[in-house]
Amino acid sequence: MIDKRVKCIADAVAGVRDGDVLLVGGFGTSGRPAALLAGVLELGVRDLTIVANNATIGADIVGDLMRAGRIRKMVCSFPRGLQGRTIFDELYAAGKIELELVPQGTLAERIRAGAAGIGGFFTRTAAGTRLAEGKETRIIDGQAYVLEAPLRGDVALIKGLRGDRWGNLVYHRGARINNPVMAGAARLAIAQVSEIVELGALDPEHIVTPGNFIDRLVEVPHEERT
């Protein structure tokens, strides 16, 4: 019998190791698996690389991980907080955290390429800018294109709205950003959902992430902090 469910957050994040690359879904705090990230903080692992659309807004779980000195590198599109300086700015200015800045569309496509087994792709985004330095550039149809490498993680942390014991997931509107593609781009995919439902309760036409992409599933009914 296929059953991806685990009893608690600690069981869900068991096996996350020092130095792992974590793919973290969501857009800002919307769709971010905060409970799983809190479990990673509690686990005590260090030297992590976090791949996410945003770094931290300041008062959030990623900021907590940064304050605890657990994150070595951020790979993201938007490292700054919307309300001004954050702990990321302080750490980056002090040389205590690394940053790989990636345009949003390029970030999503690099992760998709990692999930699909694609060896890389050419894009016009960032051509002729500092972000293209050190990367292969080709002229295609008279336009400069930059070669971007696929991006995979050791662990994907996913937030869905509902799931079943097979690991099938549905999402809440825009909170699905990056979550589905990240589920296929890591050796271990862990999902938190607000509700685990019985098999057959999810409309197959509404399932965004099929269960074969998910390894562990934990229910977090009342998450207060993102």
Image (tube, rainbow, N blue to C red):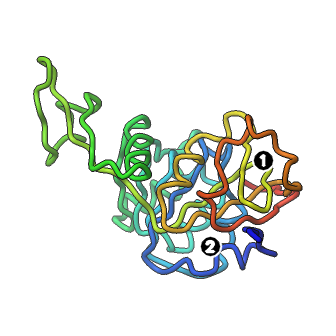
- Residue underneath mark 2: 40
Q: Secondary structure at mark 1?
A: strand
Residue positioned most to the top: 142
Q: Quadrant of residue 208?
A: top right
Mark 1, mark 2: which one is toward the viewer?
1
Q: Quadrant of residue 44?
A: bottom right
Residue 161 badge: 1
Few, some or many residues within 10 Å of mark 2 (<14, 14–19, 20+): many
Compared with residue 21, is residue 11 higher up or lower down, i.e. above or below? below
Q: Quadrant of residue 28?
A: top right
Q: Position of residue 215 (x, y in %)?
A: 63, 67
Q: Residue at position x 37%, y 38% from top?
A: 106
201 vs 131, nearest the viewer: 201
Q: Position of residue 185 (x, y in %)?
A: 47, 56
61 vs 204, nearest the viewer: 204
Q: Residue at position x 85%, y 54% from top?
A: 199
Q: Is residue 52 left or right of residue 139?
A: right
Q: CA distance from mark 1 to mark 2?
A: 21 Å
Dot 1 or dot 2: first in sequence order is 2
Q: Is residue 147 left or right of residue 208?
A: left
Q: Amino acid at mark 2?
A: Val
Q: Residue at position x 79%, y 62% from top?
A: 165
Q: Is residue 125 left or right of residue 192?
A: left
Q: Amino acid at mark 1?
A: Leu
